[in-house]
Amino acid sequence: MKKLITAGVDEVGRGCLAGPVVSAAVIFKKGIDLSLLKDSKKITFDKREKISDHIKNYSYYSIGIASVNEILNLNILQASLLSMKRAIDRLKVKPGLTLIDGNFAPKGLKNYKTIVNGDEKIKVISAASIIAKVYRDRFMIGLAKKFSNYAWERNFGYGTKAHLEGLKKFGITSHHRKGFKPVHKILSR
């Protein structure tokens, strides 16, 4: 009997005040070390980088992104689902089953299952969360070089004290999500 090809999908950055939402889709190849895989939020930055490289070496993977403008125009949930759909569509190998973190799935998928806290329960979803988080963190670190007033190299766009102070002092950038409350408050002063 032929083994079902299973993909794991997760997104990162839904709760950020700046930057895109990023999803990854992952299908394991032989040789992956499953013991390394857990929810990306429970792994240190340096370890996550190394584990991400390991996953990339032992899987088919792809990234999907929804921009700040798409987040503003669609809403964060729909933009997250769009980024997931883009990641799934970009996989070179097509899965027979797609396991998605959370309780929503992109429209038009066949043979999928949503799993709440899937990044903690299912290794292939954990792998997707790690790849997506490393990709997005690197993206925000790159933006921090141009926009140094918001501490994005440390907070990756989340609403930390340093980020909120930067917003109050220096205003918003084109990378801020204007519809999100703390950003919107500054716009409406």
Image (cartoon, rainbow, N blue to C red):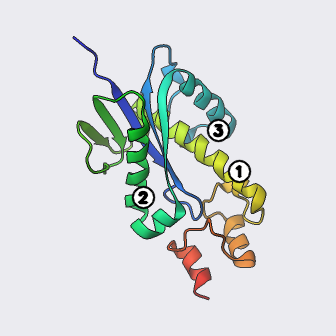
The tag on residue 141 is: 1
> Alpha carbon of mark 3 to alpha carbon of mark 2: how far?
27 Å
Is residue 171 placed above or below 54 in the rendered structure? below
Viewer-closest of 14 and 165: 14
x 50%, y 13%: residue: 31
Task: Tell me which numbered mark, 1 or 3, is placed earlier along the sequence.
Answer: 3
Mark nearer the viewer, 3 or 2: 2
> Alpha carbon of mark 1 to alpha carbon of mark 2: how far?
22 Å
Is residue 155 placed above or below 69 in the rendered structure? above
The x and y percentages for residue 79 are 42, 58
The tag on residue 79 is: 2
Residue furthest bottom as drawn:
189
- What element does badge 3 sit on? loop
- What element does badge 1 sit on? helix
The amino acid pointed to by label 1 is Ile
Viewer-closest of 152 and 86: 86
> Does 105 sit left or right of 40 as displayed?
left
Return the residue at label 3.
44
Mark nearer the viewer, 1 or 3: 1
The amino acid pointed to by label 2 is Ala
